[in-house]
Every structure is written in C-alpha cells, then in structure tokens.
Image (spheres, rainbow, N blue to C red):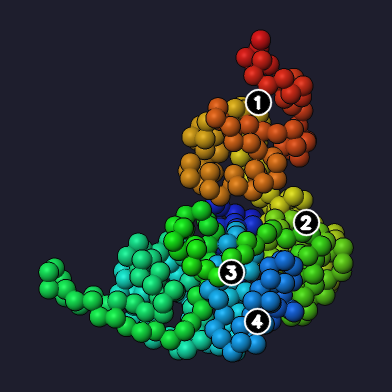
C-alpha cells in the first residue's frame, strides 16, 4: 500500500486500518521499544509478563509459552520481540497461514536453538495437522515425524531443545481448548486510552525527529481508535502536512487540518465509516436495515462493511447489530449533526417503527 498525498481511502487502503502494510512494518522496526520498561500501555500485561520472565531467568529456565490476543496494532509482535530480548534469546518469526502442513512446522521446530523464541502470528489460522503436532512439541518438546505412507508409514520421534512459543491471535475464540491450555501465560491486549497514545506519539515523534506540541499529540491520539499503529501512521501523515504546509511544528490546528485532508474526523471515522452511517441514517431512517441492503447502498461488498467498518462503529456506540438488522444509535445522529426521527428520539422501539 503506497500512501501519497491523496484522499482516496478505499476499503483496501485506509489510513485508520489497524493491519500493517509494508511501509508500517519498515517504520515500526525503528519505533519499536526494546524492553518492557520502554513499552507504553498494557500495564497489567506488562506487570504479569515481567514476573513470568524474571522468574524464568532466576531459575535459568526457558520461559513459559505465551499467548497474546487482541486487535491488530496493539503491540503483540513488539511484545514477542521484547520477550526474546529479556530472555537474551534469538527469535524466529512465522505465521499460521504459512504453516499449511505438519512438515512445515516440523522443519521449523527441528531447527530451533535451545531457549529460542518462536513467534507464531495468527496462530488460529494454522492447519489442523500442524496444530496437532504443536501440542506434543509444546508439552514434551518432541515431535513424531511420519516417514512413508499407508501401512508402511513409520513415526520417528524427534527430540526438540526447550523453546518458548509466543502465539498471537486476533480471534482467541477460534483456538481449540487443547492448544489454548498448553500456554503457561495468556494475556489479552486492550485498546489504549488517549493519554497512553499521547505518550506513544511523543516517543515516536522524538525518534522521527518531529516536533509536536502536547495539544497536537492529543488531537492525533483522539483520532487513533485506541491503536498505537494507527497513531504512528497518523503522526507520519501529519508530519508530512506540517513540513509542506507549515514550519514543521505539529500543533492542534495543524493536526486537525492535516487529518481533514485525509478524511479522518474527530472520532477517528474515515470515509467508509461515515458512508455507512450516512446511508443508515439518511436512506433508512436509522434502521433496522439488513447488512446486504446497507452494503449496496454504500457501494461496498457485504464483507467489507461487516468486517472493516462495523467493528469500530459498534465499539464506539454508533451502530448496533440486532436480529432485525443494523440500527443507528442516538450518538450516530449526534455525530453527523442530524436530527433523529420521533421513534429514535423517543426510544419507543418497535411500536414507533411500525407506527403503532
């Protein structure tokens, strides 16, 4: 994804997308904190993980397997690298979709060094045969390699050096219980508060050699959807605007003007989000309306509306999913500056919807 000076933020190219593109990955490598003390936010997770790692170092043992769950962009990959750094161990990075066969996993496991950290992103998307092999590897540090096919197949046991598996998932509910139970430490990453994102922005600005005023950082943080990755991305776009249109200093006015160019409003909604709300409010009176009908009205695929736009709108309390369809909340009407119909304003529900 190539971000240039354009306001065309399609569903596949969104400034507020929490999934990293290649530019994000390159910048994040420079911005990532190197240890737990430098890591901002996730206070409970940091405290608990610090205890786990300190105890393992004191015993001279390999750290327990760690499962990190939460939305994209909250720091799961960063924490995996910090775990390796804190344990003074190398790290191997792969992902669930890359492991399609048990042999793929066996090749990775058999090449691990003692104490090495294996980071497995999107672990819920790993194939079932590989998943079953992972059970034994995590618990007994052993895998059985099958040689041959049919009745003549032979299982050859392969001993593995002790290692630490760090699994990351955005959908912890998809992990089977036998796999989930084999993790010694499980943590859920929460969305960040604006004050925490302001600290992230100030730290990143220092590393990027950008001058940002406190009110400028607050303006960016308020539009970052509680996600550090989005905060850093918005900071880079505001930096570009400040360097071209101003003297390079990021103030509240500069930040607001820059993000207006990129169509990111005060609550972090972009063109797609507002398009969904406007269709729901202006065309369907606030709902209820079916997902397919709403997607057609917006001009997007059903999956795009459901998986890209709706989660944030629901989390912000702007949209509700009901058995009868999507319904706008009073906050959605207020955000777009529109007056709700009597049924929405009075909150009488189904009686007013059917004119009863």
C-alpha separation, residue under disc 4 versus residue under disc 3:
13 Å
| Label 4 or label 3, whichever comes before in sequence order | 4
Q: Which residue is mark 2?
A: 222
Marked residue nearer the N-terminal end (1 or 3): 3
Precedes in sequence: disc 2 or disc 3: 3
Q: Which residue is mark 1?
A: 285
- Residue at mark 2 to residue at mark 1: CA–CA distance: 29 Å
Point out the residue furthest to the top here.
Answer: 356
Mark 1: few, some, or many residues within 10 Å (few <14, many ≥20)?
A: some
Camera-nearest label, 1 or 3? 3
Q: Earlier in the sequence, mark 2 or mark 1?
A: 2
Element carrying mark 4: helix
Assess whether mark 4 and mark 2 are in contact (beta carbons under 8 angstroms): no
Residue 289 appears in the rendering: no
Q: Are marks 4 and 1 in contact (CB under 8 Å)?
A: no
Q: Kindly identify which numbered label has been placed on residue 185.
A: 3
């Amino acid at each position: 994804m190539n971000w240039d000076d354009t306001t065309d933020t399609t569903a596949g190219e969104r400034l507020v997308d929490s999934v990293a593109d290649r530019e994000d990955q390159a910048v994040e490598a420079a911005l990532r904190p190197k240890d737990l003390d430098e890591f901002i936010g996730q206070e409970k997770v940091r405290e608990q993980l610090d205890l786990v790692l300190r105890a393992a170092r004191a015993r001279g043992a390999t750290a327990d397997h760690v499962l990190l769950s939460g939305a994209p962009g909250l720091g799961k990959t960063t924490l995996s690298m910090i775990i390796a750094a804190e344990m003074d161990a190398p790290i191997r990075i792969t992902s669930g979709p890359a492991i399609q066969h048990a042999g793929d996993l066996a090749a990775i496991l058999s090449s691990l060094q003692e104490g090495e950290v294996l980071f497995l992103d999107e672990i819920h998307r790993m194939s079932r045969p590989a998943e079953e092999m992972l059970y034994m590897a995590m618990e007994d540090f052993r895998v059985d390699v099958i040689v041959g096919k049919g009745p003549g197949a032979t299982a050859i046991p392969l001993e593995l050096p002790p290692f630490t598996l760090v699994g990351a998932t955005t959908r912890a509910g998809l992990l089977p219980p036998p796999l989930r139970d084999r993790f010694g430490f499980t943590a859920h990453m929460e969305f960040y508060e604006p004050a925490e994102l302001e600290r992230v922005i100030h730290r990143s600005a220092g590393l990027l050699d950008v001058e940002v005023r406190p009110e400028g950082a607050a303006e960016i943080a308020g539009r970052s959807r509680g996600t550090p990755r989005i905060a850093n991305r918005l900071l880079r776009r505001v930096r570009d605007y400040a360097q071209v249109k101003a003297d390079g200093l990021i103030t509240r006015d500069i930040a607001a003007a820059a993000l207006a160019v990129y169509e990111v409003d005060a609550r972090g909604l972009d063109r797609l989000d507002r398009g969904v709300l406007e269709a729901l409010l202006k065309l369907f009176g606030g709902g209820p309306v079916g997902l397919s009908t709403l997607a057609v009205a917006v001009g997007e695929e059903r999956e795009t509306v459901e998986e890209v736009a709706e989660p944030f709108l629901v989390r912000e309390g702007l949209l509700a999913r009901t058995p009868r369809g999507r319904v706008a909340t009073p906050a959605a009407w207020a955000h777009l500056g529109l007056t709700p119909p009597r049924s929405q304003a009075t909150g009488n529900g189904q009686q007013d919807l059917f004119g009863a």
